[in-house]
Image: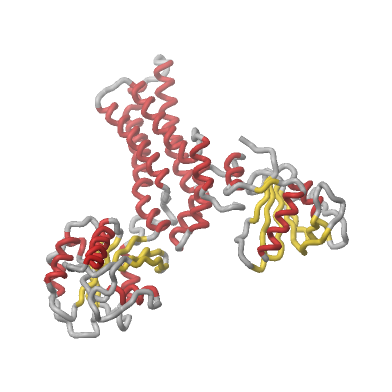
Amino acid sequence: MITNDTIAAISSGLTESGIGIVRMSGPESFEIASRIFRTKSGAAADLSEPNRVHYGFIRNVSRETSGAELLDEVLLINLKGPHSYTGEDTIEIDCHGGVLMMKRVLGTMIAAGARLAEPGEFTRRAFMNGRIDLAQAEAVIDLINARNDRAIRASVGQLRGDVSAKIAKIRTTILRDTAFIEAALDDPEHYNVEDIDGELKEHITDALNDTERLIASYRYGKLAREGINTVIIGKPNAGKSSLLNALLGEERAIVTQIPGTTRDTITESISLGSLSLNLMDTAGIRKTDDLVESIGVKRALDSVREADLILCVIDASVPLDEADRDILDYIRELPVRVLFLFNKSDLETAVDTDALLKSMPEEKRGNLSISALTHDGIGTLTETIEEMFSMGEISYNDEVTVSSMRHVELLKKAAGSMRSVLVSMEDGMPEDFFTVDLMDAYTALGQIIGESVDDDLVNEIFASFCMGK
């Protein structure tokens, strides 16, 4: 599926900037560029030498008119296919970054014979022309949307081909063993499957372990890409809104001495070192007859169930009351990470913090003393959250991180097929049973990098791209 027309689009953001980039790709790119571009001397540029930067002017020329109007002073870069992003002849024009100017340059390209590109069509052509595989193409949009350093590193690794290389390694193992089994079945006089039963089991076990490590990495990849869903809970006036404001560095939430001031959830996203937090300040959790406040309390409890992290704010300046104990009972059994924040450290402590922590499961005893009012301990809080969600045994330098649910589902399917092979071997099933499951695993892994995928899936993936990429 290689298209034969020439597409054009604005590749930089549609906002005022110093430089604007307008890109064109396809078989007529050089011809169109020769028609609309002139050097300072007024001559047409020599585009026979690829990968050159040419200085000159864009002219407003169409096929219907012979007149020409100078539009802008630009730099033109010509890239000869297949050594370009799309694998096709490509022209990139760097013009002045006014929105109107970029639109006029694009309009000139279209008037001279190009077609307006669809969202993601440049990257789609790169995929269709074999410049990148589907996993790498998906990494492009992830890199554009990255909100923190971890997301950038994960996306760059996938764009570089780290995920694809790991998938290729597993598929090579599967294909080699499948080929041997097929050969043994077709020519039993020269090949004996029983001679490699132990080796075959070892190969499949190693491939399964590699696949399961990729599946396990999704948790970290998802947090890197989407951010950590962090819910701040506590009773009224515990200091939740003050904490939100301290983390944001601005007065985002209203803070008063009146209990129940926060009636609804407030959501903000912040960058926290190499992570992103999707912070949600909730209504104070307590029993109330106020209809509006009770709705806010219900929403707070619902949001806790979907959280990756709970910041449980305890007012340590007063003894625990029924509202505190209800909150502790509620979160004790939830499968969510909890960090207890004993607030108002600037005042005398009235809470037996040791007893509170001992009442919680061991994995939920993380705690800090802070003052949301004076910001004491806020720096330590950010460091603690980073440590809680560190990659642990997974290092971006050594391990591949998967961040796509599509990839995970296909990896799980492949892992299931590999487990079926091992079960069949233990049960002494005929070898042709092995090959069926092995090829199912091989096919599922291939769909991650774009083999045997239908047009609907490809269209869905590239529809999420921005125009000009």
Residue 218 to residue 99: above or below: above
Residue occupying image coordinates x 20% and y 66%: 365
Foreground of the two, 262 or 211 = 262
Residue displayed at 52% across by 40% down: 458
Q: Residue at x 56, y 44 (%)?
A: 132
Corner quadrant of residue 390 = bottom left
Residue 349, given in percent of the width and then of the height, sits at 17, 81
Q: Residue furthest bottom?
A: 347
355 vs 157: above or below: below
- Tell me: residue 65, above or below residue 314: above
Relative to the observer, which residue lies in front, 60 or 418? 60
Q: Is residue 153 left or right of residue 124?
A: left
Image quarter in which the N terminus is found: top right
Count of numbered tags: 0
Q: Position of residue 183 (x, y in %)?
A: 43, 20
Which picture quadrant has residue 169?
top left
Of residue 80 and residue 395, the one placed in the foreground of this image is 80
277 displayed left or right of 331: right
Give whichever of 162, 284 is nearer the camera.
Answer: 284
Asked which quadrant contains residue 439, the reply is: top left
**Which percent across, then down, holds residue 353?**
15, 74
Q: Position of residue 358 (x, y in %)?
A: 13, 67
